[in-house]
Image (cartoon, rainbow, N blue to C red):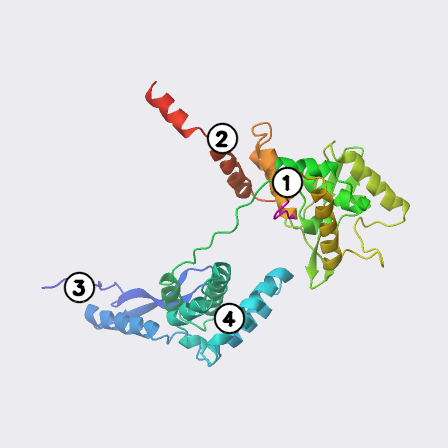
Amino acid sequence: MANKKYTLGSDGYYQTKVWDGTYTKSGHKHRITLRSAKSSRDLERQVTEMKAQVEARNFVRDTNILFIDYARSWKLVYKARTSNNTKRMYDNIIEKHFTALGTIKLMDIQRIHIETLLSNADGHARTQQQILLTFSQILKSAVVDKLLAANVAEEILRNTDKVKYKPKENRALTPAEKKAVFEADYKYAADQAYLYLIYGCGLRREECVALSVFDFNFKKSELSISRAYEYIVNDAGEKGTKTWNSVRTVPIPQKVLPAIRDYVDSVKRSGRTQLFVTMKDSKPFTKSAYDRMWERILTSMQAVCEEKIVGLTGHVFRHNYCSSLCYQIPKISIKRIAELMGDTEDMVMKVYSHILAEKEDVEGAVNAAINF
């Protein structure tokens, strides 16, 4: 005689819990109780029927909402607190790519739809990565909103291959570029001060353009970073720094301190408080004003540089700052470098690991180990 799958409880019922295709607020599978007073086999039948209903998406709210309409609502409601740059990325993906799904209902979405979107962006790996990221977030949100069965979303995402995208490798300044930083004859003092700040303090662009005279303590040779600007089309809008709700303090190296102090003093004498403003109306730097300044900086550096300057961005200076500090380990810890950068220890560790790999003598180490 075959063994019963379920045992009879003291209350006279066969009982088990089964997943209904939804999730709890904590992200765990939501299960409901099924009972039978007849037999173990009858309970098995109920479980089978329940699983079939989950597969048929019967345990989600009945809705005719289109995928594109839900995607737009998702961006407006659930991504309202993201940065403007992130919002623009979602807008680009939804309006330029997801509109291709036309009148496809959210509840009818299938793996073929994401594969079609990815195929349409063939040859643009970064865009494909953003498409898959956005699509995945939308499906997961629809599951939480009970508009899509969890098992359907899981199956689509599980069977969709990850996009192979490798961003451009960060680089530090070349010796010639470092030399040019200090030999260049800058058109404006603001240009020199900006470059010295990102070179000597590792600031992000959005942090540097938001600086005021109140952020400097020259008695301690320190600079405090507590806010940042982001560009909304062309105008600057204030936002939080990456280390939101906290103030980051960094030392100002002696090599750049005199020029920075002279510029801050000149700003004070002018009656302004902001370090970097437009010449026309003394308002915070616009995107176009920043671009013009960066072009002037590159022109000034190129005039004295021994090599052609290619691909030099503000982020190169930040990566150079991090790399330079990593060469000082263990004199300074990875944790402290991360604090100075306003970034994570994982990010610093990636830079440090790359430096270690460059310094490794694999052949020499193997020979020494085997010949010991």
Instruction: Select label 2 or label 1 by which is in front.
Output: 1
Mark 3 to mark 1: distance in Å?
A: 81 Å
What amino acid does circle 3 point to?
Lys
Q: Does 213 sit left or right of 327 as displayed?
A: right
> Where residue 4 is drawn, which disc sits there?
3
Q: Specify the farthest residue to the left.
A: 1
Q: Which residues are magenta?
A: 309-313
Neighbor class of circle 3 (other Cα within 10 Å; few <14, some 14-19, many 20+) is few
Instruction: Let me know if residue 311 is in the magenta part.
Output: yes
Instruction: Select label 3 or label 1 by which is in front.
Output: 1
- Evaluate if marks 3 and 1 touch, with contact meaning CB atoms under 8 Å apart: no
Q: Secondary structure at mark 1?
A: loop
Residue 309 at least partly seen: yes
Q: Specify the farthest residue to the top.
A: 372
Neighbor class of circle 1 (other Cα within 10 Å; few <14, some 14-19, many 20+) is few
Instruction: Select label 4 or label 2 by which is in front.
Output: 2
Mark 4 to mark 2: distance in Å?
A: 44 Å
Instruction: State which tag comes first along the sequence, 4 or 2.
Output: 4
- Evaluate if marks 4 and 2 touch, with contact meaning CB atoms under 8 Å apart: no
Instruction: State which tag comes first along the sequence, 3 or 1.
Output: 3
x and y, in percent, of residue 149 in the image: 40, 70
Instruction: State which tag comes first along the sequence, 2 or 3.
Output: 3
Mark 2 to mark 3: distance in Å?
A: 65 Å
What amino acid does circle 2 point to?
Lys
Residue 36 at least partly seen: no
Q: Does 187 sit left or right of 241 as displayed?
A: right
Label 2, on which residue? Answer: 359
Q: Secondary structure at mark 3?
A: loop
> Where residue 12 is drawn, which disc sits there?
none
